[in-house]
Amino acid sequence: MMKKYTIYIGILLSLVSLSCEKHIMGIQYDDNPEDNFEAFWSEFDQMYGLFRVKAVDWGAVYEQYRPMVNGQTTDEELYAVFVEMLSLLDDGHIILLPVGTDLPMYRGGPAGRIDTTRDFNLELLKAFYLPESRETDFAIVYGWLEDGIGYMYFNNFADGERAFEKEMEPVLEYFRDAKGLVIDIRGDGGGEDIAGKTVASYFTVERRLYMTTSIKNGPGPDDFTTPEQWFIEPKGGRFGQPVVLLTHRQTISARETFALAMRTSPQVTTVGDTTAGAFSNLLLRELPNGWGYSMSIGEWRAADGSSYEGIGLPPDEVVQNDRADYLSGKDEALERAIELLR
């Protein structure tokens, strides 16, 4: 399932309907405040995949918030109730889009609280550190830093395997004589987990388990699919020199599962800040009133069974960029990466 925000916000907008009633989970709901609440709570109750991980009692949430909604509840009041409920989940894959109102889009987790431009901007980085950058047709910005160190930035992790299998080998051949390589996955947006798996496979000499995934597939709290194991496996044209992976608080979704894969390789060191903590795939839904929303649908875990949902992956070395320094041309995280690779 696609996880890139710029794509699924558009899909949420496309869910707007002229109908004033909807069939959700086999139940007909009308467009009134009480039915909108029931539809909203019920869909999360049956399809949301992270109640166990986040230790949230959704039944208790119903008991607390249902009395706040009645036939006279306004859009503003209903929105406030939904936002309070969703805030308990602190999930970066949750968006609530109150279509047809002047109310703002709600986005959960750190992604909804942090300005991505505060500590990273690719155009500034290119201007100060990468004046002769190149770009592939699909997703990679790359070039030489100082001291024979290569740099790769991924605009997205969409389109699965095909595009990356086409682009990775020529780029890594370009860096064949590099002393080391910086891979930068700071910035917003997710994509497809299979894309990150494909890229990470160019940085391993052996088959490595890095993740398991299971999806909510029934109404009961423990109704999940059998966990699927994810491995990286050596690919031709692999890069064998040291690698520094740069992350920050907006490294999210498929970027995070890529980080999970990369950190299993001994040649990789992570530098920067803890990632956003939103790993699971998501589902797009619509309420009877036309409001769109998304929810996480499963448990994405590291190879050792740990869940980093709502927590994020900590780097090996924490380096948090200062906004003023960054705007003046100093990227502390990148400079530390260069220092480690010299």
Image (cartoon, rainbow, N blue to C red):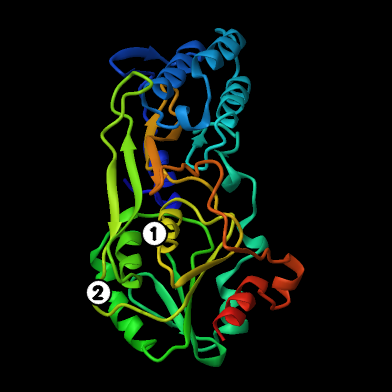
Q: Position of residue 326 (x, y in %)?
A: 70, 71
Q: Residue at x 76, y 69 (%)?
A: 324
Q: Which mark is residue 92?
A: none
Placement of the C terminus among the 4 image quadrants? bottom right
User: How far across and down, in percent of the image, does residue 173 sit?
Assistant: 32, 86
- Whether residue 175 is situated above or below residue 94 in the rendered picture: below
Q: Nearer the viewer, residue 288 or 164?
A: 164
Q: Secondary structure at mark 2?
A: helix
Q: Residue at x 45, y 59 (%)?
A: 259
| Residue identified by numbered label 2 | 166
Which of pointers 1 and 2 lies earlier in the amino acid sequence? 2
Observer-nearest of 327 and 97: 327
Q: Is residue 193 left or right of residue 166?
A: right
Between residues 304 and 214, which one lies in front from this camera angle? 304
Query: What element does badge 1 sit on?
Result: helix
Q: Is residue 285 left or right of residue 81?
A: left
Check the picture and name the quadrant holding the N terminus: top left
Residue type at the position of mark 1: Ala
Residue 266 seen anywhere in this rendered image of the structure: yes
User: Residue 218, how many percent across, how many down?
Assistant: 29, 23
Coordinates of residue 250 in the picture (x, y in percent): 56, 55
Hey, which quadrant is residue 203 in on the image?
A: bottom left
Against 308, residue 334 (above or below) is below
Rendered residue at 59%/76% (across/down): 125
